[in-house]
Amino acid sequence: MVIIMKHNATAQEIANAMKRVQELGFEPHPIIGEERTIIGVVGDERPVEPDVFDILDGVERTVRVLHPFKLASREFHPEGSVVRVNGTTLGTNQVIIMAGPCSIESREQLFEAAHAVQEAGATILRAGAYKPRTSPYSFQGMGLKGLELLKEVRDTLHLPTITEVMAPQEVALVAQYTDILQIGARNMQNFALLQAVGQIQKPVLLKRGMMSTIEELLMAAEYILSNGNARVMLCERGIRTYETATRNTFDINAIPVLKALTHLPVIADPSHGTGRWDLVAPIARGAVAAGADGLIIEVHPHPAHAMSDGAQSLKPEKFAQLVQEVKRVAAAVGRSA
């Protein structure tokens, strides 16, 4: 349920409405806009009729949110949200590109990749210190040492960073070293982890699970939002289908669907979406045309020697070419990159 206050509602009227929400056992989530304030009513409001709030002074009308996700819905927040990360803004008309290696393997590899993607036009560095792998015998990442290297690169190149966090008890540690916390596809419904990242004020990139519906993705985002962290971005990274020609099936439909349902920025991951470096660029172009707010691309200086996901990683020169292509597509649909 959403309470829409009148454009001239006073601060006291807004406070009274929020107090009434609390008296009825719900949690108020106010959004203060330039012209009016909207108050989200969070909880099971089915037993409550909207006129309970309609009669309050300063209330214009009350609207039920039809979707099970409340805080993530456009009904609650009609305007698109923006997420600011150290001088970079996601969710505007500009397409933001995050790029870098799947895994941090060494100081030399990370710096070489970071220099390359920054020079080509990426504004956020992606690199994994902890890697959830299907096999327990595969490379699992450098852990704390990787985080320290990530921070060194960030401080040296003044390049914001994103890396994955895998467990609730690691959230505080990882947050010390990076600018954006990534929740991987395998952890999309790790509810303890979602609650943990919801309790800190760090931007979060939430990836869609390999076999998850769009509604399940938005309900996972709701866990983060309901715990107080509004700096959430969603990522379409491909889903598992019967098709075997690619690693996953990139659901380009999800981008405009999500943009219609939610105010949260939407990022596309064509690297995991295809699993093939030669398909990354065409899917990236399509994602931008479909309305993605950003891209996250795997780039490795020497993909043949990568310790994870080398087959889907672009060489720096191919990534630089992709950036130029994305700029042209963005311009064609009235955007920038």
Image: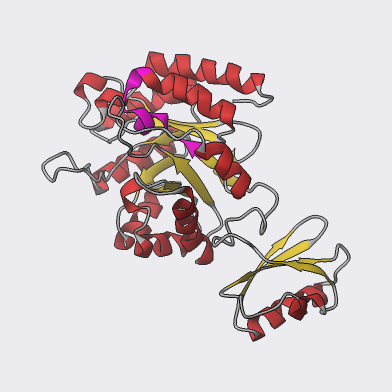
Percent from the top left, x then y, of residue 152? 36, 39
Q: Is residue 73 visible?
A: yes
- Looking at the figure, which quarter contains the C terminus? top right
For residue 29, which quarter of the picture? Answer: bottom right
Can residue 184 be seen in the rendering of this structure? no
Q: Is residue 308 left or right of residue 269?
A: left
Residue 32 percent across, percent down from the top left: 73, 61
Q: Nearer the viewer, residue 86 or 281?
A: 281
Q: Position of residue 235 (x, y in %)?
A: 46, 42
Residue 180 position in % (x across, y down): 45, 47
Q: Which residues are magenta?
A: 267-278
Residue at 58% over, 38% down: 256
Q: Residue at x 80, y 75 (%)?
A: 54
**Residue at image point 33% right, 33% down:** 248
Q: Decide which of 113, 287 is in the foreground and name it.
A: 287
Q: Is residue 271 magenta?
A: yes
Q: Is residue 51 magenta?
A: no
**Residue at x 81%, y 79% (from the top left corner):** 56
* Residue 266 in the image: above or below residue 172: above
Residue placed furthest toward the left: 137
